[in-house]
Image (tube, helix red, strand yellow):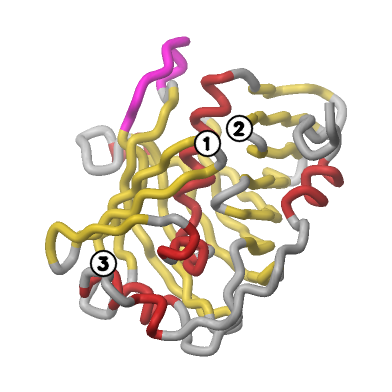
Amino acid sequence: MSFSRRRPQSIAEWEQRLTQKTSPLGCFNSGELSGLPEPVRRHFTAAIRPGTPLVRAVRLQMQGRIKLGRWLPFRATQLLDPHKGFIWAARVARIITGSDRYLDDVGGMDWKLAGLFNIAHGSGSDVSRSAAGRGGAEAIWVPAALLPRFGATWSATSDSHVCVHHLLGNTPVEVDYTIGPDGRIRSLVFDRWGDPDSTGIFQWHPFGGEITGYRTFGGLTIPSAGRLGWGFGTDRWPDSEFFRYQITELQPIA
């Protein structure tokens, strides 16, 4: 099996695969938006400053709180290419460490307590399918990756509701955004494969959340803070929110 297709065996190898350099993509200009619905053009105009070098991948630093029975603090680093995959490596409450990841249509997770005891492991087709949905939706942090030149298809149902469809590997991802008059995302929702109630049965469930903050990093203005979880837009949302994040650094990967 060739190196380009075999599953990475270490975090370092995951990083190497996700940060492989590509040919220069040029800089953003309004011509990229020709033919798109007005609300979509408004969104990109708010997200990418003219002249900003285009990239499909970023390295993120984030912090926040995650609900694992109770709310716990975390700090994490993430490499993300919404068309290839991601690796999210975190430390939770200072004693839980591990990573969630997806690449080459394979997802997984491994978490340890105090670096010694395995407390969570996930693999297989259901985990991979769920991870693909997550990675695709996190394209909100790499807005240039969703330009039409990269295969993304956009539609608008109203002045404040738009939808994007694209591929993460071979998995289709479709996400609905609610946007404001300024073009910024206020909330997002999509159908994600998962088992949020730990029943042993994976199904499609609404997943999403609210954006609570924005920051600009090198010409990219992204949803830098938010609240996410299962059942967004349904009665179960207040109890199913489990992730609150704040992005503190973003570095484009050219």
Which numbered dot is residue 194?
none
Residue 201 in magenta? yes
**196 shown above or below 78:** above
Q: Is 149 situated left or right of 162 in this image?
A: right
Q: Position of residue 184 (x, y in %)?
A: 33, 72
Q: How many marks?
A: 3
Which residue is under mark 2?
105
* Label 3 vs label 2, nearer the camera: 2
Q: Position of residue 113 (x, y in %)?
A: 77, 30
Identity of the amino acid at label 1?
Answer: Asn
Which residue is at a point 59% across and 44% down the rendered structure image? Answer: 72
Residue 167 in magenta? no
Q: Which residues are magenta?
A: 197-205
* Label 1 vs label 3, nearer the camera: 1
Q: Position of residue 199 (x, y in %)?
A: 43, 11
Which residue is under mark 3?
179
* Label 1 vs label 2, nearer the camera: 1
Which numbered dot is residue 170?
1
Which residue is at a point 52% across and 77% down the rendered structure image? Answer: 220
For label 2, count other residues whose C-alpha is less than 10 Å away and answer few (under 14), some (14-19) or many (20+): some
Query: Which of disc 2 and disc 3 is earlier in sequence?
Result: 2
User: Which SS does the magenta portion mostly show?
Assistant: loop
Q: For numbered disc 2, what is the local secondary structure?
A: loop
